[in-house]
Image (cartoon, rainbow, N blue to C red):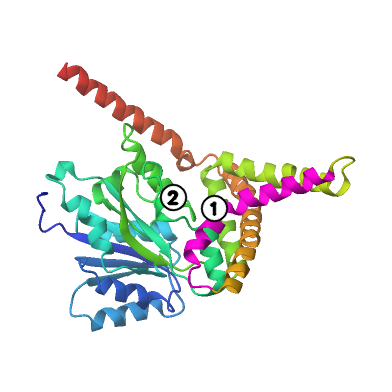
């Protein structure tokens, strides 16, 4: 039986920008937490749709639990907004989520349980990774969720880099990791995750895994929105120098393998059927996992709706990949133009931190010997 530590002060933080349509959904789910936060700090990046007024009005109706503090910082990006909110937090433990999600009632309790269950403060983890699940309606959103969102049983906790829709960490770990990278507009949570991992060079991950800390996230409702989202993600990858191999494989697939198979199927001088077989196998591999997810996510669809959703999967994948291939070189070009900025070379800092910690560990081992 674990010894529970009472009185651990938890601050939930979030950033918002023009979220008038969805902000009360998040706030209501925060108020319904079985383990209420001690305070909520929200940073508004300068909304023009009345989001800040809605937050203020909602907070005024509450009996004081949770206490909501609003910071308005026009022009702040996501990283800047999160850092401002964390700096303003009164307690030692930070839980992070996003506007546009709905939190399960047990979300915060599950997210902070590994901290509270630790026998001593020294035994607490630096960070805990929660999870997010699709909140979908209709054929297209179901297909979108099956295509772009992993299921919990697909996650390897040792390699998982959590979204900041559902994550918690100590304020000390946030400071040691350098905070969220304010030079980066997208993919900022991945860099932060990697810096948290760098604090624990001898462990596969710096995050404890809490899959029951779930938030419900609505995927994009249109292909145009998907394009914008994935273009920005890939541009962030380029700026941050992330996932070189993944992007290289994507360019090779669409630029070499697909034209070769299609060319052979249409114009080959022998056994054109091999080209068609290759294309069929490629599509099956390309869409196999989303189709398997669709079996589970599409249980409420009729057979006709399920078939339509299945046909949407390759379209969604192709549009997302095209957006990534368009965005990644834009990010690389930005990185090249700003290559003198020291914060762009975050990997070197991470390696130096890992070397320092490993040296410290070796020194401690020598003294113990």
Query: In front: 332, or 299?
Result: 299
Magenta-colored stretch includes residue 7: no
Tell me: 152 left or right of 316. left
> Could you tell me residue 17's position as x and y percent?
44, 70
The number of numbered badges drawn on the structure is 2
**Label 1, label 2: how far apart the Cα atoms are:** 10 Å
**Which circle marks residue 9 in the picture?**
none
Precedes in sequence: disc 1 or disc 2 = 2
Label 2 sits on a secondary structure element that is: helix
- Residues at badges 1 and 2 in contact (C-beta under 8 Å)? yes
Tell me: 54 left or right of 299. left
| Residue at the far right in the pictured view | 269
| Residue picked out by circle 1 | 289
Looking at the image, is 199 positioned above or below residue 170?
A: above
Q: Would residue 115 be visible to someone looking at this image?
A: yes
Q: Looking at the magenta stretch, what is its main secondary structure? A: helix
User: Residue at the location (39% across, 60% down)?
Assistant: 132
| Residue picked out by circle 2 | 154
User: Residue at the location (66% across, 52% down)?
Assistant: 283
Q: Residues within 10 Å of mark 2 (few under 14, many from 20)?
A: few
Query: In front: 94, or 296?
Result: 296
Q: Would residue 72 be visible to someone looking at this image?
A: no
Magenta-colored stretch includes residue 288: yes
Q: Residues within 10 Å of mark 1 (few under 14, many from 20)?
A: few
> Could you tell me residue 177's position as x and y percent?
33, 43
| The quadrant where residue 225 appears | bottom right
Label 1 sits on a secondary structure element that is: helix
Q: In this picture, which residue range is highlighted in magenta?
A: 272-301
User: Residue at the location (20% across, 23% down)?
Assistant: 364
| The quadrant where residue 275 appears | top right
> Could you tell me residue 345's position as x and y percent?
48, 38
């Amino acid at each position: 039986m674990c010894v529970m530590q009472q009185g651990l002060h938890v601050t939930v933080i979030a950033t918002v920008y023009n979220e008038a349509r969805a902000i009360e959904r998040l706030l209501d789910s925060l108020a319904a937490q079985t383990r209420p936060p001690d305070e909520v700090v929200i940073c508004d990046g300068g909304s023009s749709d009345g989001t800040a007024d809605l937050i203020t009005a909602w907070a005024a109706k509450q009996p004081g639990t949770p206490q909501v503090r609003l910071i308005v910082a026009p022009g702040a990006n996501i990283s800047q907004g999160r850092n401002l909110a964390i700096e303003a937090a009164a307690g030692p433990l930070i839980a992070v989520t996003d506007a546009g999600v709905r939190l399960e009632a047990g979300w915060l309790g599950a997210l902070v349980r590994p901290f509270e269950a630790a026998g001593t403060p020294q035994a607490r983890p630096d960070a805990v990774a929660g999870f997010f699940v699709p909140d979908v309606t209709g054929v297209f959103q179901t297909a979108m969720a099956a295509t772009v969102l992993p299921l919990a049983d697909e996650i390897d906790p040792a390699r998982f880099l959590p979204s900041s829709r559902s994550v918690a960490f100590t304020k000390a770990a946030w400071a040691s990791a350098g905070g969220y990278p304010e030079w980066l507009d997208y993919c900022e949570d991945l860099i932060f995750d990697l810096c948290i991992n760098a604090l624990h060079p001898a462990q596969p991950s710096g995050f404890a895994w809490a899959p029951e800390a779930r938030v419900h996230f609505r995927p994009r409702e249109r292909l145009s929105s998907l394009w914008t989202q994935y273009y920005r993600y890939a541009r962030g990858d380029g700026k941050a120098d992330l996932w070189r191999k993944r992007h290289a494989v994507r360019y090779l697939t669409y630029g070499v393998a697909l034209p070769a198979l299609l060319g052979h199927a249409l114009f080959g001088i022998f056994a054109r059927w091999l080209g068609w077989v290759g294309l069929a196998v490629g599509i099956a591999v390309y869409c196999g996992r989303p189709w398997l997810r669709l079996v589970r996510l599409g249980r409420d669809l009729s057979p006709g709706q399920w078939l339509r959703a299945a046909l949407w999967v390759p379209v969604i994948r192709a549009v997302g990949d095209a957006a990534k291939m368009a965005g990644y070189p834009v990010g690389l070009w930005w990185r090249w133009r700003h290559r003198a900025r020291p914060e762009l070379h975050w990997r070197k800092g991470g390696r130096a931190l890992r070397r320092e910690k490993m040296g410290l560990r070796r020194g401690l081992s020598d003294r113990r010997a």
